[in-house]
Amino acid sequence: MNGTGNPRSPLLEARGVTRVFGRGSGAVTALKGATLSVGQGRLIALKGRSGSGKTTLLNIMAALDSPTEGTVIYGDRDGSKMTDRQKNEMRRREIGLIFQSFALVPYMTAYENVDFGLRIAGIPAPERKKLAEEALAFVGLAGRMHHMPPELSGGEQQRTAIARAIAHKPALILADEPTAELDSRMGKQVMQVFRDLVRSEGIAIVMTTHDPHIMELVDDVYALEDGRIGSERSKEA
């Protein structure tokens, strides 16, 4: 999942993923054999009503949770055979995570928030500065990088979160409702950043959304219903 190799080879494949929470009569099945293939340079939306399993699937794809049955293949690596340490290392270096709530440290500037993520990934200080500034410039915040989150608009805070997610140059970004807290104008700004990332960097992005307008801006839309995935719309690569 380093963005190299055959561009037609999937970066990630969820194969027959089932996730059951609880046991016995209180067990809840969130996913039932969900299967999804993510190719390089694709912008994918997962839609479905609340409780349909979108966030559960995203967490499993991010190796933050493990399926009850099935597995996730990362390039040529079987997630079910990876240790927790290997999964942590993969997340730090190969996957970018974006959340609905921005999850920025309020007393750190935009630059410091991005730098902090790079520090966690173990990247040396001189390289961190270059990567953080490049990422913030890419999302249009070169002139705002020394502002604290409360001094930034909602769209600027989400773009800071995107910069933090892309600074270490991952092959895959997983975003949980990244535009849900934004108005339509700011949501479109975020989607334009996503489209630029897919087009210029070849990054694959999988995002959950309820917004039909956002779904018009992505390459592929998959619907989650009753824990299973069905293809609804796909544009040619």
Image: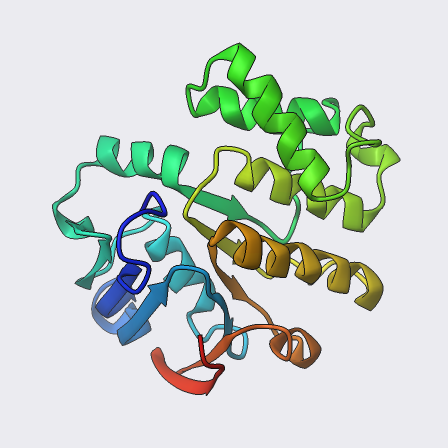
In this rendering, position of residue 224 left or right of residue 109: left
- Residue situated in front as seen by the camera: 7 or 160: 7
Task: Confirm whether residue 78 shows in the render.
Answer: yes
In this rendering, position of residue 126 left or right of residue 81: right
In this rendering, position of residue 89 left or right of residue 214: left
Looking at the picture, how far across and down is residue 107, in whole percent? 75, 22
> Which quadrant holds the C terminus?
bottom left
Write down the quadrant of residue 115 in the picture: top right
> On screen, 113 above or below 161?
above
> On screen, 133 above or below 45?
above
Identity of the residue drawn at 47% across and 13% down: 124
Looking at the picture, how far across and down is residue 17, in whole percent? 24, 68
> On screen, 128 above or below 126?
below
- Residue situated in front as seen by the camera: 10 or 8: 8
Identity of the residue drawn at 33% across and 56% down: 60
Task: Confirm whether residue 106 shows in the render.
Answer: no
Identity of the residue drawn at 52% across and 17% down: 127
Write down the quadrant of residue 37 in the picture: bottom left
Identity of the residue drawn at 72% across and 22% down: 108
Looking at the picture, how far across and down is residue 187, in whole percent? 75, 62
In this rendering, position of residue 99 left or right of residue 224: right
Q: How many marks?
A: 0
Looking at the picture, how far across and down is residue 211, in whole percent? 66, 75
